[in-house]
Amino acid sequence: MAHDTPVNTTLIGIIGGTGLTELEGLEITGEQVIETPWGMPSAPLVSGKLGGVPVVFLARHGNPHRYPPHQVNYRANIWALKHAGATAIVGVNAVGGIHAAMGPAQIVIPDQLIDYTWGRGHTFFESVVDAELEHVTHIDFTHPYTETLRSALQAAAQDEGVSCVDFGVYAATQGPRLETAAEVARMERDGCHLIGMTGMPEAALAAELEIDYACLALVVNWAAGKSDHIITMDEIQAAIDEGMSGVRAMLARFIAS
């Protein structure tokens, strides 16, 4: 599987989440509107160079930000990036923190995940119009994130002097609402360290197409019940403003290396 092989950096794909609808410093060379067997991606694929290295960027929620987490066409997004030649993808995600080390504006590179979503188009291995499956396929998903990509992101953080937590179990929830305190307590008992709404099925779809994949998460709020106040959009935006510069610096260094 792609998750056990060295990273092929022929073309790196970056999927930007909340707070990253554009890739700063990208020397744009073109845009592609790709229609896929699964419909249209969230936005055109923006091709270009960052530090002289070819990359392709996709805004997960569209640009402007308009698709909520449960309505993102994850299959179209991943299929389009594969079609464009991406061999490795970094998904940037805004998350809530459960673990004490994962407070607002902290950057995390998770190493595991638990999927609590439902009703999303979560696999390529199903019949589509005028095409039936020839056989049933089960992928190994023991390690959902490519270790070589994770290591490269950790090295980029160190080189840039960016504070980064290099572990974490990502709880993927349905959204678009935030979670209850009881739900967060349950996920903490399950072993989760951070909560997001877009980590799945994105990671699994990349694995199905044998694309190396890693998550670069920015904590934008304490999860419900982990602070003494309710969660506000002002709080989330402040954490995005504070932490996104570190995310951009890490991405630039990661791509350059």
Image (spheres, rainbow, N blue to C red):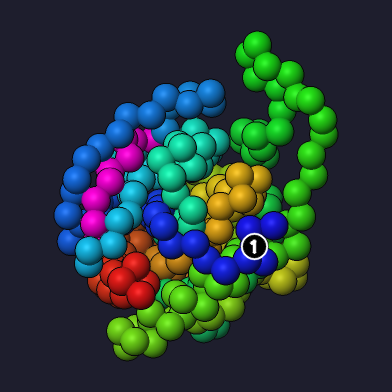
Dot 1 crowding, Cα within 10 Å, few <14, some 14–19, many 20+ = many
Total labels: the figure holds 1
Residue 208 visible in the displayed image = yes
Residue in the picture at 65% in, 34% down: 124
Q: Nearer the viewer, residue 143 or 103?
A: 143
Residue in the picture at 34% in, 49% down: 56
* x, y percent for residue 109: 51, 72
- Position of 150 with respect to 253 (left or right) is right
Q: Specify the farthest residue to the top.
A: 130
The answer to whether 107 is drawn above or below residue 85 in the figure is: below
Residue 64 visible in the displayed image = no
Residue in the picture at 49% in, 62% down: 8
| Majority secondary structure in the magenta region | strand
The answer to whether 210 is drawn above or below residue 105 in the figure is: above
Quarter of the picture holding the C terminus: bottom left
Q: Nearer the viewer, residue 133 or 239?
A: 133
Q: Which quadrant holds residue 233? A: bottom left
Residue 98 lies in the magenta-colored region: no
Region rendered in magenta: 42-50
Q: Which residue is mark 1?
A: 3
Q: Which quadrant holds residue 63? A: top left
Residue 47 lies in the magenta-colored region: yes
